[in-house]
Image (cartoon, rainbow, N blue to C red):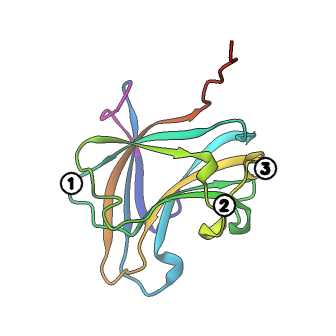
Amino acid sequence: YNGLHGNISKTTNAYAGTGALRWEYELPATTDPNQFYTSIRFDLGETKDLSSYDKLSLRLYRHAGNFPQDLLYLKFYTANLADPNVKAEAWIDRADCVVEPSEEWSEWQIELSDLRGYQGQGTASQEDLTDIRYILIGTGTSNLTGAKLGTIDIDELTLIKNPTCSGR
């Protein structure tokens, strides 16, 4: 977790199974653009080659009362977590991204071929996914005139390979 205030815990509010990750975050009012975003980090345990996968899917449960943010994002990092080592990004960039749908599980399915480059510049390639160690999920806003807080439950982060047909 790399926010100023927040909590990560296990919850029984799971999409599948008996537990999910609960992320409670708070972004205090600030004029420092380095504090406009917050994220949590999933460690894959070792560097992985994700280039053979077609999609990434995760389930999100947005709690009622979340303050609107401009952006919900995933970032794919190498073993070095410095920003230039962001290999690819996926964004939901709309004002209700952490608000709707509220109080129900929804699926965020990402075509890995549609990933953006660092800071949304260009398009990431399959080569960019050959040495991924961390996946960050984060949120933020370009306007922190007031504190922004919320709770999101996360479950079922899954990498998907589409089946191939043999043509017979």
Give the residue pinned by disc 3. 127
Give the residue pinned by disc 1. 64
The mark nearer the N terminus, 3 or 1, is: 1
Give the residue pinned by disc 2. 123
Of the residues shown, which amino acid type is indicated by label 2? Thr
Residue drawn where x is 71% and y is 65% of the image: 82
Image position, residue 57 (x, y; %): 49, 39
In this view, the residue farthest toward the bottom is 31
The mark nearer the N terminus, 1 or 2, is: 1
Foreground pick, 155 / 110: 110
> Is residue 11 a member of the stretch shown in magenta?
yes
Dot 3: what SS? helix
Which corner quadrant of the image does residue 106 belong to? top left
Up-down: is 101 above or below 144? above
Of the residues shown, which amino acid type is indicated by label 3? Glu
Image position, residue 103 (x, y; %): 22, 45
What distance separates the C-alpha of mark 3 from that of mark 2? 11 Å
Of the residues shown, which amino acid type is indicated by label 1? Ala
Q: What's drawn in magenta, residue-wise?
A: 9-16
